[in-house]
Amino acid sequence: MQLIGGSNGPDFDVLIIGGGPAGLSAALQLGRSLRSILICDNKEPRNEPAAEAHGYLTRDGIPPQELRRLGREEVEKYGCEFRESRVTNVNRSENRFTSTLDTDQTVTSRKIVLATGVSDMLPDTDGFEELWGNGVYHCPYCHGYEVRDEPLGVLVTAPEQIEHTKLIYNLSIDLVVFTDGQDVFDEETRSEFVERGIEIEEEPIAALNGTDDGLESISLADGRDVSRHALFYAPPTQQHSDLVDQLGLQVNESGLVETTQSHYGIGFTSVDGLFVAGDASSESALSIPCAVADGSMVGGTVNLELAREAFE
Ligand SMILES: Cc1cc2nc3c(=O)[nH]c(=O)nc-3n(C[C@H](O)[C@H](O)[C@H](O)COP(=O)(O)OP(=O)(O)OC[C@H]3O[C@@H](n4cnc5c(N)ncnc54)[C@H](O)[C@@H]3O)c2cc1C
């Protein structure tokens, strides 16, 4: 096992685990505050399958990798170091963290920002994963405009997902709601939908069919094919990183890390000195602008905590 650094103090003020919009934004605040930072990222961003990212002011339509590249370039100006590796283990002892990387190196830091994101739990229907982000979308704000007025579908497998349909109806009135064989609608809601010309298709889905250009049709178990240009589905998510479990962090009913606030900041977790930002946190809202905003505020909070400690 190789130790990075070697002096008695920690190697870095802050280790940021995850170099997506949240981690990079935290790094920008910390780097501009003269903190030494290491970002470890194992290059598995949540929006990797999408060709474009939308809804982030001044960068609307940018390829996700390009947004990261620009972010990295900006934080490197302030001396932030990068390592393309996964953090496999974090230990807290006295007033420092010792983290192990998948390269078997260890890194010590005063603070940690966990910006590891979430993963989407997709149905194992044929074609679903292949078309995810390219014809099958989770979010109408991110990808709805591009498919407006086209024949659209919504996958609704639980009553709490019905509200999502109203957002999609706003984009196109040529709308089919697929329940994949689940009993989701009560009579009143069904009538509301039918009165608006929305078709409800309750046959189980056999496969999604498409090409590199996106979705073409949805095959049903009874052999019918329904032609659709895009399908929307808001899947449940899970923490991307098992560090959340390993550290015993408190999570809410959706599996997002519970945070607390203090009079000087946000993103505190149940582990002293370890903060969470972005999609992984219960305080963010699962989009790039929200992850950037959260990362920025958490970065500021960590910096203020370090500044206060210098006076203790
Ligand atoms: C298909 C798709 C398309 C999307 N399109 C849009 C869009 O157009 N607009 C929009 O606003 N939002 C979009 N989103 C949502 C957006 O991707 C997320 O809200 C955003 O990426 C959250 O940023 P984050 O930094 O919290 O997490 P992420 O971007 O997921 O970054 C987390 C990073 O942490 C790394 N990581 C995880 N564990 C470890 C570990 N143990 N060690 C080291 N690194 C680790 C991962 O590899 C990853 O790079 C989309 C989501 C999906 C699924």
Image (tube, rainbow, N blue to C red):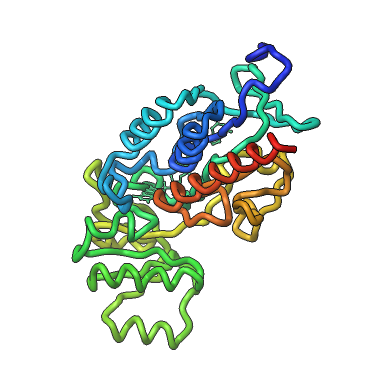
Position of 211 with respect to 290 (left or right) is: left
Q: Identify the residue shown where x is 31% and y is 53%.
A: 55
Identity of the residue drawn at 31% across and 46% down: 53
Q: Residue at x 51, y 69 (%)?
A: 158
Is 264 displayed left or right of 237 in the figure? right
> Which residue is drawn at the image coordinates 39% and 43% (left, top)?
47
Q: Position of residue 172 (x, y in %)?
A: 23, 69
Instruction: For the C terminus, give its image quadrant.
Output: top right
Q: Is residue 180 left or right of residue 143?
A: right
Quadrant where ligand 1 appears: top left
State whether residue 182 is above or below residue 214: below
- Name the outermost residue toward the front: 311
Horizontal side of residue 41 vs 302, given as left or right: left
- Indicate whether 194 appears above or below 296: below
- In this view, 165 is above or below 288: below
The front one of 151 and 244 is 244
Q: Relative to the observer, which residue lies in front, 54 or 51?
A: 54
Q: Farthest residue toward the right? A: 94
In percent of width and height, residue 241 lies at: 59, 39
Q: Which of the 4 quarters of the picture holds residue 300?
A: top right
Residue 153 x, y percent position in the rendering: 31, 64
The number of numbered badges drawn on the structure is 0
Looking at the rendering, which quadrant does residue 193 occupy? bottom left
